[in-house]
Image (cartoon, rainbow, N blue to C red):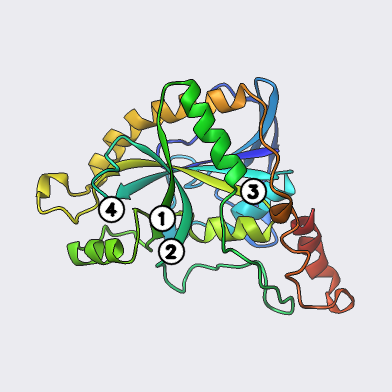
Amino acid sequence: MLAIVGGTGLYDLPGLNIRARHGADTPFGQASGEVLVGEIGQHEVLFLARHGSGHRLLPHEINYRANVFALKAAGATMMLGFSAVGSLRMELKPGDMVMPEQYIDWTKADRLRTFFGDGVAAHVSTAKPVSANLVQAVVAAADRTNERVTRGATYVCVPGPRLGTQAESHWLRQMGGDIVGMTNVPEVFLAREAQIAYATVGLVTDYDCWLEDESQHVSAMGIFELYGQTLIKARAVLDSLLASELPEPETEIRQALSHAVLTPPQVITAKQRHWFDVLKK
């Protein structure tokens, strides 16, 4: 089942025929809100607003573990996020849609990055953190709507909530970043631990602040203004995706825990097994 995670400006999913609501409580705390279960066209889908209803949560306040766990418990095998991003490359223009396939984690220690620890040890491979099958399906859906989605970008995740300095923006470019955002880490890595095929559509709102032309620098109001316009295009792509056959998650993603867990099953407690069994589904 496909889970859709709404970012800035996407707090509900028009057209979703809601038939169930899952509560926000999880073994890892409260998710950003209820998980909505419903249908769009021929597909059953899940929806969760990453920042909560009304954009209540800053990036560092989001309980990413609870969000991913809540979606997995509701039946998610694939997860497609939408996020506002800044461009670190001139060719990726404001208004463009970009799908990252690599990530650089530049966040801080206050974000809980794993479900594991406290007696259950696992090391999950994230060499290729994104589902190529899901990316290709979204790109194909965009082609059918005469929209363009650029794939293969590297997303640098920064902690926020402040917008970066010009020196930091130049440094992120030197690191190999193509786009910058605040929310995809640890979401992308937790999805892999939950054996969920993950991808994100990044909606470019600005050139961050690496250009000398200050009129091109990121601002909070500018993000919301252009993001809303680009979101219309993104929704058309999503509708096209849901009007067609959805891809199958890669086997290696759906079995990511099969060779990653080091703790013997017999020493895992009943409380730990409660959440561990959900991740393994």
Taking the image as shown, residue 54 lies to the left or right of residue 49, namely left
**Amino acid marked by disc 3:** Ala
Q: Is mark 1 on a helix, strand or loop?
A: strand
**Disc 1 marks which residue?**
155
**Disc 4 marks which residue?**
88
Lower sequence index among marks 2 and 3:
2
Which mark, by number, is residue 104?
2
Q: Is residue 246 above or below residue 64?
A: above
**Amino acid marked by disc 2:** Ile
**Disc 3 marks which residue?**
197
Q: In this view, does 256 lie above or below 21?
A: below
Other-residue count near label 2 (Cα within 10 Å), few / some / many at <14 / 14–19 / ≥20 = some
Q: Front-most of 193 and 60? A: 193
- Relative image position of residue 60 (x, y in whole percent): 43, 61
Other-residue count near label 1 (Cα within 10 Å), few / some / many at <14 / 14–19 / ≥20 = many
- Residue at the right extreme? 266
**Amino acid marked by disc 4:** Leu
